[in-house]
Amino acid sequence: MLTSHPIDPASASTSPRADEPAGAHALRVACSSCNLRELCLPVGLSEPELNRLDTLVGARRTVPRGQTLFHSGDAFQSLYAVRTGFFKTRVGSEDGRDQVTGFQMAGELLGLDGISSDRHSCDAVALEDSQVCVIPYAQLESLSREFTGLQHQFHKIMSREIVRDHGVMLLLGSMRAEQRLAAFLLNLAKRLQARGFSPRALLLRMTREEIGSYLGLKLETVSRTFSKFQEDGMLEVRQREIRILDADALQALLNGPGC
């Protein structure tokens, strides 16, 4: 998402610890540069559990920019943890246009849409060269029944996705254009900060048109709103490079009256 590297305490040391069980070091080193933490639970697990957990990720898959990880209608078999890169999910509307339904970055999951019907209900498209960890869902279910910690974490992930969907519904239903874009930028900054990036310097991988599709706004409205935010001193805008100059002002705008 940005050209800088996140601060990763887990990668500070890659030497085996004296008290580390056999097999734990290899798992820890393999994950030391990965932003995904939700499904990696080596702490507190026994050596047999670590060995089982180490088999969870079936493979890593590279998805070049513009290519699709899965299509709407594809059979659901696996979840995908974004290891590096950035994705968008989209669905086709009745008038033939694509509707962007979300943006996913490193440390987030793709494919949850397929659990209910055993088929994916959207396309997942890479916005830059990306890599995902393939997690076979049947194996995840089996391990979740054995490891209560893994099951609990997976439920937290699903709950987070529900909360995010509710937030988008609120955006589209009750907020003005300026509030929608402010909410989008603040949410993006918060997600980046959680991964060790600067919450003020954003390099957008999506286009203005894709942002508009996600927020229910026309391209012209998105461009005009970015310009207004820059004129008001809240942002510095250089094409896709965005610097948040006044996060408090964006938050105040978001908290103001809606439509």
Image (tube, rainbow, N blue to C red):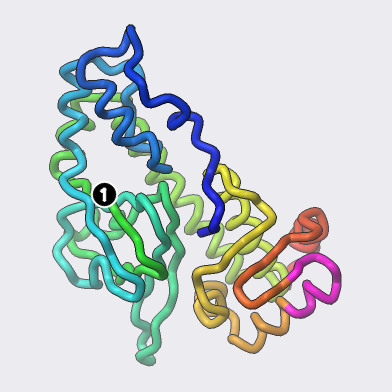
Q: Is residue 189 left or right of residue 225?
A: left
Q: Quadrant of the C terminus?
A: bottom right
Q: Nearer the viewer, residue 16 or 60?
A: 16
The residue carrying pointer 1 sits among few (fewer than 14), some (14 to 19) or many (20 or more) residues within 10 Å by Cα, namely: many
Whole-percent x and y of residue 64?
A: 30, 69
Whole-percent x and y of residue 38?
A: 38, 37
Q: Is residue 92 left or right of residue 254?
A: left
Quarter of the image for residue 254 reads: bottom right
Q: Nearer the viewer, residue 142 or 233?
A: 233
Q: Nearer the viewer, residue 59 or 165?
A: 59
Whole-percent x and y of residue 217?
A: 59, 81
Residue at 50% x, 30% y: name it: 9
Q: Is residue 175 above or below residue 13?
A: below
Quarter of the image for residue 73 reads: bottom left
Q: In terms of secondary structure, where does tag 1 sit? A: strand
Whole-percent x and y of residue 233?
A: 85, 68
Q: Is residue 244 above or below residue 194?
A: below
Q: What range is drawn magenta here? A: 227-236
Count of numbered circles on the image: 1
User: Which amino acid does the dot numbered 1 rest on?
Assistant: Cys
Q: Is residue 20 above or below residue 121?
A: above
Q: Which residue is mark 1?
A: 133
Residue at 30% x, 71% y: name it: 123
Q: Nearer the viewer, residue 29 or 196?
A: 29
For the view shown, which residue lies furthest in the right direction?
232
For the view shown, which residue lies furthest in the front direction?
15
Query: Magenta includes 37?
Result: no
Residue at 44% x, 74% y: name it: 100
Q: Is residue 160 above or below residue 114?
A: above
